Image (cartoon, rainbow, N blue to C red):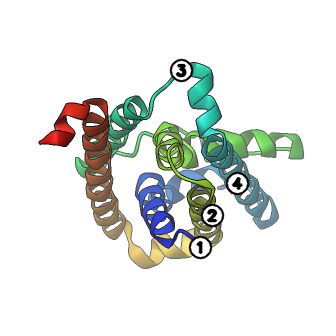
Amino acid sequence: MFAFDQFGIAFMAFFAITNPISSLPVYLSITEQEDNDTAKLIARKGVFVAFLIIAVFSLGGKIIFETFGMTMPALRLAGGFIVFMIGLQMLQGGQNSTVNHPINPQNAVRNREDILGVAVSPLAMPMLAGPGTIATSMNLSADANMTGVIATVLAFGLLCLITYILFLYGKRLIQLLGRSAMRVLTRMMGLILAVIGTQMFINGIYDAFPMLKAI
């Protein structure tokens, strides 16, 4: 049976930490001087590379754990701290560190060979698949069964599809919402992200100290 609860939790976590709406200005600055076909190609390659990155870390989370001798409590503590700090920064009005990548609008993509490079960095990493997103995907998948892992990957896949659509209609969306509304939305996502990070941290402490389970 499909793990709908895992899918819902993963989607909300990914949506909060990636916040594709607040990422629009970065994408638009990258593609400002490009034609529509090139801009669409950059968006498509960017979300595809981001999906591959998260899929690898989700599907191979247990192998990565065994290879480097990591434990689930350690990942939850570290990942929870990272996610909380990103959310706190967003709450304080700063840009998400996963999307805070300076772009020079004059650096246009002049040939097809440059498209993949721009799509990978900064679009795929660190904007869409940054440290917080990777930590979240591993945290959600490391102790889940295969159904839960697939649900996590599909949740990020749905987010990538939504992000791609938002990128395609980014200019119209910013004109419709206005920058003030985008700032409010960023703070709302920051609050959700801070709560998710706190819960991850609490779960890490709880699992790290079995004696607390008896309380």
| Pointer 4 or 3: first along the chain | 4
Dot 2 corresponds to which residue?
A: 154
Which residue is situated farthest in the right direction here?
112
Dot 1 corresponds to which residue?
A: 1
Mark 4 or mark 2, whichever is nearer to me: 2
Dot 4 corresponds to which residue?
A: 33
Question: Can you give x and y, in whole percent of width and height, for residue 60 in the image?
Answer: 66, 39
Q: Residues within 10 Å of mark 3 (few under 14, many from 20)?
A: few
Task: Look at the numbered discs 1 and 3 and tell me whether their residues touch, using CB distance below 8 Å.
Answer: no
The reply, left or right, for residue 30 in relation to residue 138 is right
Looking at the image, how many numbered discs can be counted on the residues?
4
Task: Look at the numbered discs 1 and 4 and tell me whether their residues touch, using CB distance below 8 Å.
Answer: no
| 119 over 35 or under it: above or below | above
| Residue beneath the point at 48% across and 53% down | 18
In terms of secondary structure, where does tag 2 sit? helix
Report the Cα–Cα distance between label 1 and label 3.
31 Å
| Residue beneath the point at 21% across and 41% down | 213
Residue 69: numbered disc: 3
In terms of secondary structure, where does tag 3 sit? loop
Residue 53: numbered disc: none
| Pointer 2 or 1: first along the chain | 1
Can residue 32 be seen in this snapshot?
Answer: yes
| Pointer 1 or 3: first along the chain | 1
Q: Residues within 10 Å of mark 2 (few under 14, many from 20)?
A: some
Question: Can you give x and y, in whole percent of width and height, for residue 156 in the image?
Answer: 58, 59
